[in-house]
Amino acid sequence: MPLTPQTLQTIEASLLAEKKRLETELGQFAKKNPNNPEDYNAEFPQIGTSEEDNASEVAIYSDNLTLERTLESSLRDVNKALRLLAEGKYGTCLHCGADIDPKRLIARPTSSSCIGCKKALTGAV
């Protein structure tokens, strides 16, 4: 079933809000790479000079790198969905070409596969 213009507007608003949230969260501990707008670089925290401070800095930086990768991946998915929307190609399964159920897209706007293909890809029954 094709997506209605109203459903597309709802999904676009949801994607834009998610993009803003992800960029805000990334901006709290990382800077945008000026050479790649979809890449962020976590900043090394400066807490102090004691051994305990140094250990804390390394632990925080390590956690931030992991979080950065996760958030960047989500941001790439959101940006891809927004590009597909702009190109009029949103809502089509990447694998079989069928329309993705609007309920799935409303629940998970970055979905790029229909339920059948997703189940086949993940081995779910």
Image (cartoon, rainbow, N blue to C red):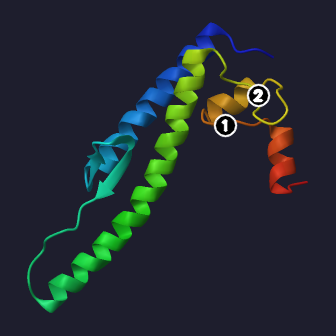
In what element is the residue under mark 1? loop
Q: Residue at x 47, y 22 (%)?
A: 13
Judging by the rendered image, the residue that carries numbered circle 1 is 111
Query: CA gap, disc 2 to disc 1?
Result: 8 Å
Mark closest to the chain's N terminus, 2 or 1: 2
Mark 2 Cα shell of 10 Å, populated few (<14), some (14-19), many (≥20): many
Q: Are marks 2 and 1 in contact (CB under 8 Å)?
A: yes
Residue type indicated by callout 1: Ser
Left or right of 8, for residue 27: left
Crowding at dot 1, Cα within 10 Å, few <14 / some 14-19 / many 20+, comes out as many
Give the residue at the far top of this rendering: 5
Q: Quadrant of residue 19?
A: top left
At a point 10% along the width and 88% down the height, the residue shown is 50
> Measured along the vertical axis of the image, is residue 1 above or below residue 39?
above
Which of 27/105 is in front?
27
Q: Secondary structure at mark 2?
A: loop
Residue bearing mark 2 = 100
Estimate the x, y position of residue 33 in percent, counting from the top left: 30, 47
Q: Position of residue 86 (x, y in %)?
A: 54, 17
